Image (spheres, rainbow, N blue to C red):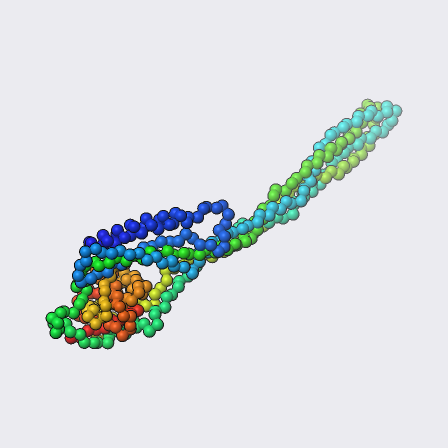
Amino acid sequence: MKTQQLQNVAIAGLTSLFVGQASATSRVASSSPIASPSSFPPHISVECHTRLATTSVAVVPTSTVTRTIQDYNPVVVYVTTQETITTTPSVVTEVETSFETQTVTSTASAITDTFSTTSTVYAYTVVTVTPPPGTSTVLVTTTTTQTTTSTIPAPAGFTPLVDSLLQPTFFRRGLDDDNTCPIGPDDYKYPSAVKCIAKLTVTPTTTSTVTAVPLTNTASTPVVTTTLTSTLTSTSVVIPEEVSVTLSYSTTLQQTLTTSGIPTYTVVTATTTQTASVSATPVYNACLSNNIGGGSPLGPEYGPIAGKVVDALYFTSLPGAHLNTVATSSAYDCCVQCQGTPNCAGSFYIRNDCYLVTTTVCSTSSHIHAHANNGAGGFDISNGPCATYVLGTS
């Protein structure tokens, strides 16, 4: 409880410090596109390590280290530009014909034995004018997300747990000549120092301009209407009673009517694909399954200790051993913390608590002794850059 309170106080102080820094360097919003390249405001994360000791101290010192991390996986911002083209069909002239009828009546001469009648027959021809076909374009935009994953290699000369744990070494589990017992995790009960690391992650951004297929709109066909007036003249002859002979004549008038047809449109679909890149959390090769084990029964790759769990740890042979606590949510995250901590010999995760074992001498020949036994739950241990876990036998 005291360790957690110390970490909370340190985090609260750092939060107020970096909130002030963030507000001092905040960006002013702009309506123009993001310049390329640029970067998002730094992301601030705070991690506190509490060093545990075998004896208590009157005052627990607190220190802060600030690290700036450059994220080399940029966030790509896509800006799409699209031109709109409007096409107007040719002008269509519609001719409307109106007719006026004029009748001329004449009376045949009474002295004539013969009279004639003339009738007019109208023949109509309908002509349909159809505008040229047009094209209507429908723009469809699809967005795909591409996730990029970076891998952080293991340190040079690194030995994973599955290779080191099968190398038994001897250590004394009883009283030695100085009447002292081997030092284990239970001996580190007192917080001696709190060290907080503030990480400012700067993520660059790039702007990519995507030119979409022009969107074509077809305007309505302009129609000009012209009215043509035709006069139809018919002649009517009144036949006197004296006339006894009738001659009939017929005249045909040809008329043309023009109408406007409906234009046809072809629908064309233009597809534009945009790709957005998203950076995933990097994977540590030093924290794969071959370097984490012991919390649950070990697998067959551990040979003679397969099916057992790690139930005890001893730091007697590790030079300048110190124990630090840090908040993580898994054995993998605990291993990652050790890989990024200077002089970290190894880590172990138990009951949702992460412990980092540090040393004053970073050497792959240094060891932390582990004991394996039958059971249901134990320590999830991982080798660090500065030491390896080995199986201890008495």
What's the residue at 57%, 51% (across, down)?
Answer: 214
Residue 263 in the image: above or below residue 316 = above
Residue closest to the eye, 292 or 36: 36
Q: Visible in this render: residue 177?
A: yes
Residue 101 left/right relative to 368: right
Residue closest to the eye, 107 or 5: 5
Residue closest to the eye, 131 or 38: 38
Res 368 quadrant in image: bottom left
Give how far across and how far down residue 136 sits, in percent. 57, 48
Residue 305 left/right relative to 269: left
Give how far across and how far down residue 125 sits, in percent. 71, 41
Res 106 quadrant in image: top right
| Quadrant (top left/top right/bottom left/bottom right) for the N terminus | bottom left
The single residue placed furthest to the front in the displayed view is: 58
Q: Visible in this render: residue 265?
A: no
Count of residue discs: 0
